[in-house]
Amino acid sequence: MRTKNIHRRLLQGIFSLCWLADLCGCGRGQPGPPDIPAQTPDVVSLAPHDWHIYYSSGMPPSPASSKGGAWSFKFPSAQGNGHVNYVQTPFNATVPLHEVSITFRIESNSAQYVERDAQDVPPATFRLFFEQRGDDLYDPNGRWWANASMYNLGSLDGETLTETVPLTPDQWTNVIGEEDPRAFADALRNIGWVGVTFGGQYFAGHGVALNDGTASYVLIDYTVK
C-alpha cells in the first residue's frame, strides 16, 4: 500500500507540473468547448456529426460514419505532425447518473502508436472522460478521467471490447490527478460533455499519433445512465 501511495503522489506531482507550466497542451491556452446543448437530455448521441474532435491536428472536425459501428476515425501520422487528443459530445443530465459504458474496436495494421508528449510514458492510451458545462480548461475540476478505463493502444486491437465504470468519486481523477468527492459531485451535476481522450500513461489528453502502419478507432456504443 505504501508503494501505491508513493506512486500516486508522483503521478499527482507530474500532473500538477504540467498543469501549472502549461507544458504540453491538453487544451489549456485555448478556449473551452462551446456551450452546445445535447440533442436529447440523458442520451449520448451516436451520430457522428454530434461528436467533436478538439485540440488535435491533422484530424477532421468530427468522426465519420462507419458500417461497423456508430462512427470511426483514422489515427493521424506523426510524420505530418498529426495527433488526436479529445473526441467528445454534448451531454446533459436531468436524472442522477450511475455509470458510463463504452463499446469499441480498434482496427489496425502494423500500427506503431506514439504519445505526442515527449514527457509522457508509453504505451499510448485512451480513457473515458467527462467535462463540466462551461469548462474554461483552467479549472482543475473541469474535467474528470476514469483511470480504470485506460486502454493501451495495440494491446487488444481487432477485438470488440466493452468497458463500464461507475460514476463514483473513487473511480475518477481531475486534471491534476486527484480524487475529490465534493468537486466530483459538483462536476457531475453540471456535466456538459462526455467522450474519450488520447495520450500516454501519465497525460490522458496530450495526444496520440502513428509512427507507422494504420489504425482506425471505431465507436460502437457509448451510454451514460
Image (cartoon, rainbow, N blue to C red):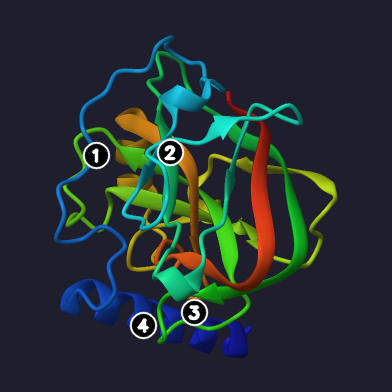
Residue type at mark 3 is Arg
Q: Is residue 158 visible?
A: yes
- Position of residue 76 measured from the top left corner of the image (x, y, whole percent): 51, 60
Residue type at mark 2 is Gln
- Tell me which label, 2 or 1, sits earlier in the chain: 1
User: Which residue occupies the foreground of this view, 51 or 152?
Assistant: 51
Position of residue 195 in the picture relative to residue 185 (left or right): right
Q: Which mark is drawn over residue 33?
A: 1
In the rendered image, the quadrant that contains the C terminus is top right
User: Which residue carries the number 4 mark?
Assistant: 14
CA separation, marks 2 and 4? 25 Å
Asked if disc 3 and disc 1 are in contact, CB closer than 8 Å, the reply is: no
Disc 4 secondary structure class: helix
Disc 3 secondary structure class: helix
User: Which residue occupies the foreground of this view, 213 or 225?
Assistant: 213
Instruction: Name the mark nearer the viewer: 3 or 1.
Output: 1
Asked if disc 4 and disc 1 are in contact, CB closer than 8 Å, the reply is: no
- Give the image quarter of residue 177: bottom left
Instruction: Name the mark nearer the viewer: 3 or 2.
Output: 2
User: Which residue carries the number 2 mark?
Assistant: 88
